[in-house]
Amino acid sequence: MEVAHLLSRRTLAMSGSGIRRAFELGAKLKDPINLSIGQPDFPVARAVKDAAIHAINADKNGYSLSRGIPELTARIATKLHNDFGWHFQNSESDIIVTPGTSGALVLAAMATLNPGDEIIIPDPYFVLYPAMASLSDAKAVYCDTYPDCKLTAERVERCITARTKMVVLNSPGNPGGVVNTVDECRDLLDLCRRKNLLLLSDEIYDEFTYTDARTQKAAKPENDPMLKCPSPARFPGAEETVLLVRGFGKTYGNTGWRLGYAAGPKKLIEQMIKLQQFSFVCAPTPLQWGAIAALDVDATLQMQEYQKRRDMVVKALSPVTGLKAPGGAFYAFPKIPEKLGMTGLEFLEAAIERNLILVNGGTFSQRDTHFRLSYAVPEHKLQAGLEVLVSLLSGG
């Protein structure tokens, strides 16, 4: 059978993940220094593993409700009330547990975007954002955020048209690790309210916010006195305009469990639940029980270790690239010095020749002038990679 003519235009228009391509390019390397994959390198906490194992042994292995097990949605509702001050009349219909944050993003796009509608995404962007538009036969509008990678109201407003329905904010961000300020979050929320647009706040890296970027208090600071990452969801009434997307994989090191959640406008969440019934069905049931235990885990020590690695990256690369300290996540997105005359892909190829795997900036952007490195690796590997990078960036 000839399959080519059966394939849809939407799938043919999408390219594979450049992150995976980078990994494949380095697959033949012997013991490479791999700074390409954004996956935490710390183990899942014992209590979280035990909770999932107990659920499996207790035969909690069937389908859950499409919105998630009530015990988990109730815990999430309490967390969001303490953190954001959000009030939920019924956590079982106001929150949806999804197969990873990617599941939440895809469901949100399917529930809001019609063919021809527009979704504004930052450039550079997480690789799924353009695909959210493609999967919905909508159009991704790229908002240029160079050189600081900040999605601001001023920049977004220039991109709005009569077809715009959604704006996507990712803070802390991938690939740049950039964290928006309180004022930037407020201004973006105000803009979306004025224009009647959905503001999707992708906060998968919410706990990976470093001390210098934590500037906003929780709604109930007596429950969590540590300053938090600024978010448009922290302002009064935000639950009517903001679709908040968060997850478990990055914070608790269980990326393969595929668990995320979304909360926000009730009518939108209801439609996302309906769509999940006919697509993913539900998030993995026994692992949802593990996620309840994860919400009791203190990840402070892991965050401190990652901040130390962040500082290593900035100290090494700032003199040769002008890199500013990322406020969160575990990535750096340096610009390749113009004197080298190299694209991001060419720089990636040069790095692979030295047993180092990175991701070229064109994977995350309409331009290919930067590269992304992940410092979610053991310190000795990171140090070895930084030594290679300093040599390459210095023209050595």
Image: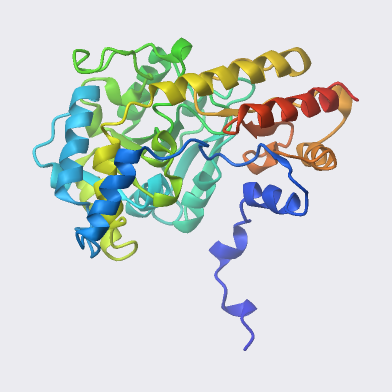
Q: Position of residue 30 (x, y in %)?
A: 77, 48
Display coloring: rainbow
The total number of labels drawn is 0
| Residue that lies at the very extreme toward the left in this rendered image | 89
**Residue at 34% in and 64% down:** 279
Is residue 3 shown above or below 85?
Answer: below
**Residue at 68% in and 36% down:** 361
Q: Position of residue 124 (x, y in %)?
A: 59, 34
**Residue at 26% in and 12% down:** 225
Is residue 35 shown above or below 64?
Answer: above
| Residue that lies at the very extreme toward the bottom in this rendered image | 1
**Residue at 64% in and 85% down:** 2
Observer-nearest residue: 230 or 165?
230
Q: Look at the image and tell me in which quarter the C terminus lies.
A: top right
Left or right, 174 with respect to 113, comes to right
Q: Quadrant of residue 367?
A: top right
Q: Where is residue 189 in the image (x, y as percent from the top left)?
A: 34, 24
Observer-nearest residue: 271 or 54?
54
Is residue 116 shown above or below 148?
Answer: below
Q: Quadrant of residue 145?
A: top right
Q: Where is residue 195 in the image (x, y as percent from the top left)?
A: 34, 31
Observer-nearest residue: 394 or 153?
394
Is residue 394 shown above or below 246?
Answer: above
Does residue 92 appear in this view?
A: yes
Q: Look at the image and tell me in which quarter the N terminus lies.
A: bottom right
Does residue 272 appear in this view?
A: no
Observer-nearest residue: 233 or 134?
233
